[in-house]
Image (cartoon, rainbow, N blue to C red):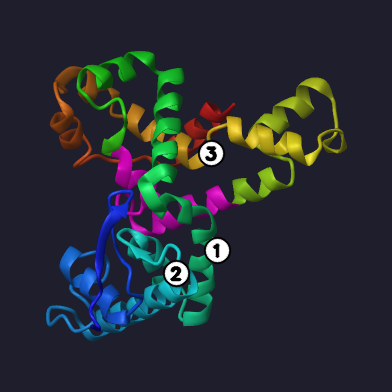
Amino acid sequence: GEGGEADQGRGGCQCWRRRHKCGVTQHLCVDGEDGRGGAAAPHLNAYARHTARRLISLLSAYAVYDPEIGYCQGMSDLAAPFVAVLADDVEAFWCFESLMQTARRDFGDGGEGMGMRLRTLARTLEHHDPVLVHKLYLSGAADCLFAYRMVLVRMRRELSLDKCLLLWEVIWAEELAGSLGFGPRWRMLLKDHATTIAEFNLSALERERRTVPDLLTCFIADVIRCQRRPLLASVRETDDVARVFSAYDIDLWKSLNEARRLQT
């Protein structure tokens, strides 16, 4: 048939194996992501319906472009900012595709990518705040599953569009600097040992990148640590953790500065 055939196996995300536009439309209508009811929803104004149609087209094109991943829940959160900012659909698609080069592993089979990211987040928290992690452990939340959405959609739901784009741009700039050999640890090594980038080969850079949590992980770790007081005072079980993070404020620049410190 023409409908999308659902599959529940990819890291807890509902995916469509059939790469039809109607499959993406149906998912947006049912799950209420940024399409908010789809392009034909009567409660949307003309601009919102146009934006929803563009978003559906972009996600449909990506499902064809990358059939191994296809479309999974959460992708619309990552794609919507590009649709909102860029009037050219081609530019929006390739910006989204560039983001998915690193994000696609989070949507892969079995949830291995997200599992690794959540374990890295838990290790980062444990290294910098073992008391808080012990409290999370007693509450059954040491696996950091409460931060699943934060990690998967890169804080898109937790921040306004402007602040989210600002966070992403800072992360992209840091990633570019790291690829050129100017990451946080390398700045320390250059300062402390008066060495030069030429003394470090690519394999060493790759090893270093794998051992240092990325900026997004450290940012999310600080966002969690900023809720330390209510977490320590009132949390007794996993649902209590979810309630703490249902409504809270984020100081973007404060958490970014702290995230850089956590990386060193």
Q: Extreme front residue here?
A: 1
The amino acid beneath tag 1 is: Ser
Relative image position of residue 201 (x, y in whole percent): 81, 38
Q: Which residues are magenta?
A: 147-172
Q: Main secondary structure of the magenta part?
A: helix
x%, y% of residue 144? 31, 32
Q: CA distance from mark 2 to mark 3?
A: 28 Å
**Residue identified by numbered label 1:** 98
Disc on the earlier residue, 1 or 2: 2
Count of numbered badges drawn on the protein? 3
Task: Give the number of the disc on residue 67.
Answer: 2
Mark 3: which amino acid? Asp
Image quarter hosting the C terminus: top right
Spatial separation of the CA atoms under disc 1 and disc 2: 16 Å
Image quadrant containing the N terminus:
bottom left
- Residue 231's x, y, as percent? 23, 24
